[in-house]
Amino acid sequence: MTIPKNLNLLFSGIIVIIAGFVYGGHPTVIMPELLGFEVVDLELKNMLRAVMGIYLGVGLYWIIAAFKPKIWYGATVCNVLFMGGISFGRTVVDGISPLFTPALILELLFFGWGLYNLKKYKEVI
């Protein structure tokens, strides 16, 4: 196991799982405190819980892949697409939010780190 190569997946997996729990863990309490809006509709709760589920699943996949060389490449491609997509949405589509700037910095860091790893460690079949 190459430690620096796998740290990208390990760290981003842990951070994304934590973010998932923040978004969907208890949205009726967390969202008013964190983002200033009430979550009362079942549909909005379901959307936030779905986002949580996506984040938990993807984060767990990355953590597992950090220890399983056979799935490392696919998980790293997934990580790059995920981080690139989120940072694209935050900057190009919505504009930069001061509240989410630390998240954007991490997303761009993991995006670049993943691209670097994909270039340096070619897929071995």
Image: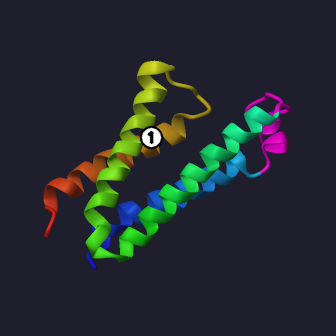
Image x and y of residue 122, in percent: 13, 61
Q: Is residue 84 above or below residue 55?
A: above
Specify few, some or many for label 1: CA neighbours under 10 Å numbering under 14, 14-19, or 20 or more: few
The figure's colour scheme reads rainbow
Return the residue nearer the eye: 99 or 41: 41
- Which residue sits at x=50%, y=24%? 96
Return the residue nearer the eye: 17 or 61: 61
Image x and y of residue 39, in percent: 81, 33
Q: Which residue is mark 1?
A: 105
- The answer to whether residue 23 shows anywhere in this view is no
Question: In which quadrant of the rendered view does residue 74 lie?
Answer: bottom left
- Which residue sits at x=53%, y=34%? 101
- The answer to whether residue 101 shows anywhere in this view is yes
Left/right placement of residue 107 relative to residue 30 reads left
Amino acid on which the number 1 mark rests in the picture: Ile
Q: Is residue 98 above or below residue 125?
A: above
Left/right placement of residue 116 relative to residue 85 reads left
Asked if the magenta segment contains residue 27, the reply would be yes
Image x and y of residue 106, in percent: 45, 46
Question: In which quadrant of the rendered view does residue 2 lie?
Answer: bottom left
Return the residue nearer the eye: 101 or 38: 38
Question: Where does the magenta region start and end?
Answer: 26-41
Left/right placement of residue 57 relative to residue 78 reads right
- Which residue sits at x=43%, y=43%? 107
- Which residue sits at x=45%, y=57%? 12
Badge 1 element = helix
Placement of the C terminus among the 4 image quadrants: bottom left
